[in-house]
Image: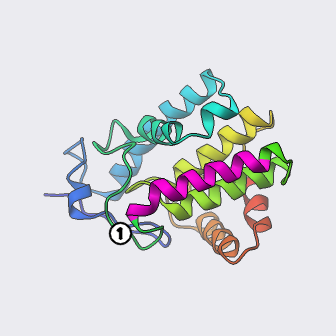
Amino acid sequence: MGLELEYEDGQTPLSEEEKEGLLIKSITTHSELDEHEQLNIEEAIKWTIQNSFSTNEILIEKFIRKLHKKMFKNVWSWAGEFRRSEKNIGVTWVRIGLELRQLLDDTKYWIKNDIYAPDELAIRFKHRLVNIHCFPNGNGRHSRLMADIIVENIFNKDVFTWNYSNMVKAGKIRSNYITAIRQGDKGSIQPLIDFARG
């Protein structure tokens, strides 16, 4: 029996080829997958807590990939590798590297020129990163952890609470998160900042 996944609103379906990258063949349901991914993510969070990173270390493609690999390497063979398929969200896959470089350059400019307050900068980064959708899976969780790393390491502020949820399960908190993301898509980033600190 293969991996049968049911997707919540805002989740990106995996291709059959991407599903073949599952390293733990005993996983057959979304809840089992979520559980194994969460254990791996907790290891990655521990790594971010035990280390401090400079702006120049964080705002490079290598770090973006490394963090995703740390978060998902025990579950997916393609952890840390950019997707090579089209999704219901994100730029066309051949533009991922280019769009990411533009985001990283823009973020360095924002920091150097004090364009945004720390929370807004980190959330704008997170929002654009998830809209690029670098990876086959885990983009929301990865972008939230990136925002935490930015706000803590670059600005020496507390990480975001994200309403004390990892938002993998359907419910009011996830619904509020998706609404805030969609408001960000329309140019209003404040609801997402408020959600992240809620």
Residue visible at 78% across and 50% down? Answer: 110
Task: Name the foreground residue: 100 vs 134.
Answer: 100
Task: Report which residue position mark 1 lands on.
Answer: 86
Image quadrant where residue 11 sits: bottom left
Q: Is residue 97 magenta?
A: yes
Left or right of 134: which side holds 130? right
Pinpoint residue 100: horizontal percent, then vertical percent: 54, 53
What residue span does the magenta drawing correspond to? 93-110
Residue visible at 41% across and 66% down? Answer: 12
How busy is the neighbourhood of tag 1: few (under 14 within 10 Å), some, or many (20 plus)? some
Task: Name the foreground residue: 10 vs 121.
Answer: 121
Q: Of the residues shown, which amino acid type is indicated by label 1?
A: Glu
Quadrant placement of the C terminus: bottom right
Vertical side of 137 occupied by 49: above or below:
above
Residue at the far left in the pictured view: 1
Residue at the far bottom in the pictured view: 186
Work out whether residue 197 can be spotted.
Answer: no
Pinpoint residue 57: horizontal percent, then vertical percent: 61, 31
Pinpoint residue 106: horizontal percent, then vertical percent: 69, 53
Q: Secondary structure at mark 1?
A: loop
Vertical side of 105 occupied by 194: above or below:
below
Residue at the far top in the pictured view: 50
Work out whether residue 90 can be spotted.
Answer: yes
Task: Name the foreground residue: 72 vs 163.
Answer: 72
SS majority, magenta? helix
Pinpoint residue 151: horizontal percent, then vertical percent: 74, 41
Q: How are the residues colored?
A: rainbow
Left or right of 21: which side holds 193? right
Vertical side of 47 occupied by 9: above or below:
below
Residue visible at 53% across and 48% down? Answer: 142
